[in-house]
Image: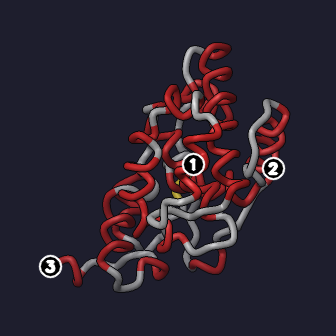
Amino acid sequence: MNKEKTRCRWAGSDPVYIDYHDNEWGVPVYDDTKLFEFLILESFQAGLSWITILKKRNNFRKAFDDFDYNRIAGYGEEKIARLMDDSGIIRNKLKIRAAVNNARAFIDIQKEFGSFSKYIWSFTGGKPIVNNFEKIEEVPAKTGLSDTISKDLKKRGFKFVGSTIVYAHMQATGMVNDHTTDCFRHTELS
């Protein structure tokens, strides 16, 4: 039955990608913990393929205490060293340190805005931007809005939040609906 559905071409045939495409990508996320998870995963994805991150997602979840930003904000050198020894995740010291740093910056935003969700969704007026791209080639890697959000996050102390990473985060968390118009999820999420 699933094979009869038309999906975004990038979903391919890998069951991990298909499940992610069909059930998560582009679904609006307003939960702070889930938003933080995607922010961390997107920052680790920089320079790598998303499927690599998805396949290691459970390892990341375990290594990073279920993406509990309060716990991650308190990570010290001993925990960072353990993470560097964890072959189940991407062992990049700069990205690991950025995750700890970003947890602290995330909490600062929560204190200022009441939640990270209120902050991040304020850039789209609280609702998804629905694009109508016919082909995957039309979907941008970044936009003026992702440039704006990236600059603001960097100003607030975040690391590994370039415009391309921010746009990928917006797509993943449903801030934008970039499913192609022939994909069954485009209509479902519009």
Does any portion of residue 70 appear in the rendered image? Answer: yes
Q: In front here: 140 or 54?
A: 54
Q: Earlier in the sequence, mark 1 or mark 3?
A: 3
Does any portion of residue 130 appear in the rendered image? Answer: no
Q: Earlier in the sequence, mark 1 or mark 2?
A: 1
Q: Nearer the viewer, mark 2 or mark 3?
A: 2
> At numbered mark 1, what does the secondary structure look like: helix, strand or loop?
helix
Q: Amino acid at mark 2?
A: Asp
Q: In front here: 185 or 157?
A: 157
The reply, left or right, for residue 111 in relation to residue 180 is: right
Which residue lies under the disc numbered 3? 1
> At numbered mark 2, what does the secondary structure look like: helix, strand or loop?
helix
Q: How far across and how far down the image is residue 173, in percent?
A: 50, 48
Q: Earlier in the sequence, mark 2 or mark 3?
A: 3
Q: Quadrant of the N terminus?
A: bottom left
Q: Amino acid at mark 3?
A: Met
What's the CA distance linking mark 1 and mark 2? 18 Å
What's the CA distance linking mark 1 and mark 3? 33 Å
Q: Amino acid at mark 1?
A: Ile
**Residue drawn at x 80%, y 35% as measured from the top left:** 152
**Residue drawn at x 42%, y 77% as measured from the top left:** 11
> At numbered mark 3, what does the secondary structure look like: helix, strand or loop?
loop
**Vertical relation: 78 (above or below) 18:** above
**Vertical relation: 170 (above or below) 3:** above
Which residue lies under the disc numbered 1? 40
Which residue lies under the disc numbered 2? 147
Q: How far across and how far down the image is residue 161, in percent?
A: 73, 49
